[in-house]
Structure formats: C-alpha cells, structure tokens
Image (cartoon, rainbow, N blue to C red):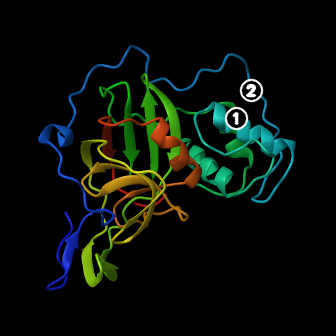
Amino acid sequence: MAALLTAGAVALAGCGTAVPSLPARDLAAPATAVAPAGAQAGPATTAPVAAPRKTLRLGAKGKAVTWVQRRLAELGYRPGKADGSYGGTTLAAVWAFQKVNGIKPTSTIAKRTWDALESPRAPKVLVPRGRSTRAEVNLSKQIMVLYVGGKPELITHISSGSGVPYCETAVWQGKEQRFCGSATTPTGDYRTTWRTSGWHRSYLGELYNPIFFNGGIAFHGALSVPLYPASHGCVRLPMNVAEALPGMLGKGVPVHVRGRFRGL
C-alpha cells in the first residue's frame, strides 16, 4: 500500500481513484482449477511461415509491414489495422512480441524478429493451474496476457507502477489537495471489479476505459506507454488495446500479477 509521505497529505495506492465498497467475495483471491490438457500451448500453425525479411523501421510502409501486422494479429497481438503503415500502434505490438520471444525491444524489425515471427514462442505461463479464462500481468517482462478458454487471446505491452514515491497537488472535489504515495503495482491474485467507459478522471490523471482489479489499481488506456514502468500503480495499455479489452474481459475474472521489473 502507499506510504504517507507528507503530514496532512492523502495516502494513495494505484491511480488515485475512489473505489466503491465491494463485498469481500468480490476481492478474494480466486480458486484455481486445472486447465484443459494442452490448453497453455501457443497458437498452432498448420503450415510453414515465410517472412518477407525486409528490414523495417518505424515509419515504413508497404506489403512487408502489412505482413507483420497480419502475423501479429494472428498470434494474439494487437498491431492495429493491417494498413501497411508502421506507426506507434504497431510498434507497441512489436515490442510485446519481442519481449515474449526474448528479444530486446526495438522499433527495428530485423533478422531475430523475422525468425521469431516464423517460429514464435508462447508467452510464459505465470499460473499453470489458473482458470482457463484469466489475465496474467508479467511485471518482469512488462506484458499482459489474457487467456480465454486456456489459450492466449490477447498479448500486450504494458507499463506498470514506477516504484517511485510521489507527492502531487491537484484540485479534487472542489478544493486543492496534496496526494502522496508509492507508485507500485502489487503482486498477488485479484479479480476484475468495476469499470467505466471512456475517459475517467482520477486524482492523478485521466484513465481510458479503466477496468479495476485491486482497489484503485486498474487496467487502462494511456497516451504514453513507455518501455519501462511509469504509472502511479495502474497497468497502462496502448489505446487500441484498451478499446478492445472491455469486450473481452468480464467482471470477476482472475487477475494474477507476478514478477519484478529489473530492466529489459
């Protein structure tokens, strides 16, 4: 939990959002169940895949970019429209894919990334006996995987809590207040609780389509999702992922947070 850093300040954890009171059963760690045999395997491929193998850099356009976008989408990543334009949305999906495949994230798509696109790894399973539908947050890799029916349905780049103590002054409920806390995303087992659509104003900023799972800590879209933990405790998502996630992640779904960021 966040530590009080300044006398008279409000101590916070997460994104500075007041959370409705919930029954204890809604916040309890979920029971686990054995997933179906073979459920953790990555997406199956039925035929060899031949990548274009043209070095691509951010801003590139053309058929090779379209190929990457379609391949990433097929594997469960969210690169945006297959429009042949290598922009920020596709970059976030490339980063997630590279991190899952043990490649240092970069905007350049070259030999190691092409090799991995032809023969991809499945994400590391954090909770092998977890429920077949669950979200796993890997703080070490800075990725989130949503499993549906035991298979990775969505794999995304994230930015979690920075771990840096903070004190910020903001106008809240009609008066200026000072908020202090420790910007951490706690590890543990949780469940999704309440949510709201569109931009939601909190003490510490704006959250897009937030889905809360641990008090004031939520998955939410953000305009900045860097390659390092940077939030006040929430799990930042690329905007296109935050747009799609509410239709995929229901209430009461287990969320497992594991690991510790030590650099990519």
Mark 2 — residue? 49
10 Å crowding of disc 2: few (<14), some (14-19), many (20+):
few
Rounded to the nearest angstrom, the CA distance separating label 2 from label 1 is: 9 Å
- Residue 81 vs residue 209, the one in the foreground: 209
From the top left corner, tell me how far across and down residue 16 is, in percent.
Answer: 30, 67
Residues at circles 2 and 1 in contact by the CB criterion of under 8 Å: yes
Q: Residue furthest top?
A: 37
Asked if one can make out residue 102 in the rendered structure from this viewpoint, the answer is no
Question: As drawn, is 123 to the left or to the right of 195?
Answer: right
In the drawing, what numbered circle is on residue 71? Answer: 1
* Quadrant position of the N terminus in the picture: bottom left
Query: Does dot 1 land on a helix, a strand or a loop?
Result: helix
Element under label 2?
loop
Query: Residue 141: which disc?
Result: none
Q: Position of residue 232 (x, y in %)?
A: 35, 67
Q: Which is closer to the viewer, label 2 or label 1?
A: 1
Specify whether 260 is left or right of 48. Answer: left
- In the displayed image of the protein, which residue is found farthest to the front? 174
Residue at point 25%, 62% (across, down): 18
Which amino acid type is marked by label 2? Val
Please name the residue shown 22% across and 33% down the image.
30
| Nearest the eye: 264 or 170 | 170
Residue 174, given in percent of the width and then of the height, sits at 30, 80
Q: Position of residue 63 (x, y in %)?
A: 86, 42
Instruction: Tell me the amino acid under the disc marked 1.
Output: Arg
